[in-house]
Amino acid sequence: MSDSTPKRAGDRPDMQTLEEGKTYAWCSCGHSSNQPWCNGAHSGSSLAPKVFQAEKSGPAAMCLCKQTKNPPFCDGSHAA
């Protein structure tokens, strides 16, 4: 794995149901086998997961291309 370049894990967002107040770790490296969530595959690189707490319960479009300007959420960067 490149030390600082994430792998594109998909070309579309992954819809997930988040629970308000729950903490999540979004994979920023693209190498996790549990996309969009971190499984520690970034170990040994300069990349780290984006840890966040869901502000509300409900569906969320999680970024898989790893190019979003609003991590961990999809902003349409995969279409560029």
Image (spheres, helix red, strand yellow):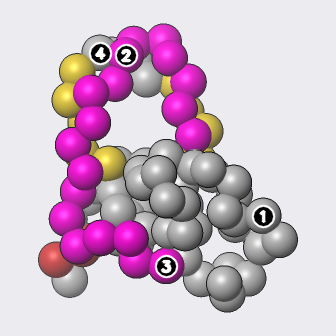
Mark 2, secondary structure of its residue? loop
Q: CA distance from mark 4 to mark 3?
A: 28 Å
Say which label, 1 or 2, has the lower sequence index: 2
- Which label sits in the foreground, 1 or 2? 1
Q: CA distance from mark 4 to mark 2?
A: 4 Å
Mark 3, secondary structure of its residue? loop
Residue, x 25% and y 51% (percent of image)? 14
What residue would you read off at disc 1? 43
Q: Position of residue 49 (x, y in %)?
A: 63, 51
Mark 1, secondary structure of its residue? loop
Mark 4, secondary structure of its residue? loop
Q: Is residue 71 visible?
A: no
Reply above or below: 38 against 2.
above
What residue would you read off at disc 2? 19
- Residue type at mark 1 is Ser
- Residue type at mark 3 is Lys
Q: Is residue 19 visible?
A: yes
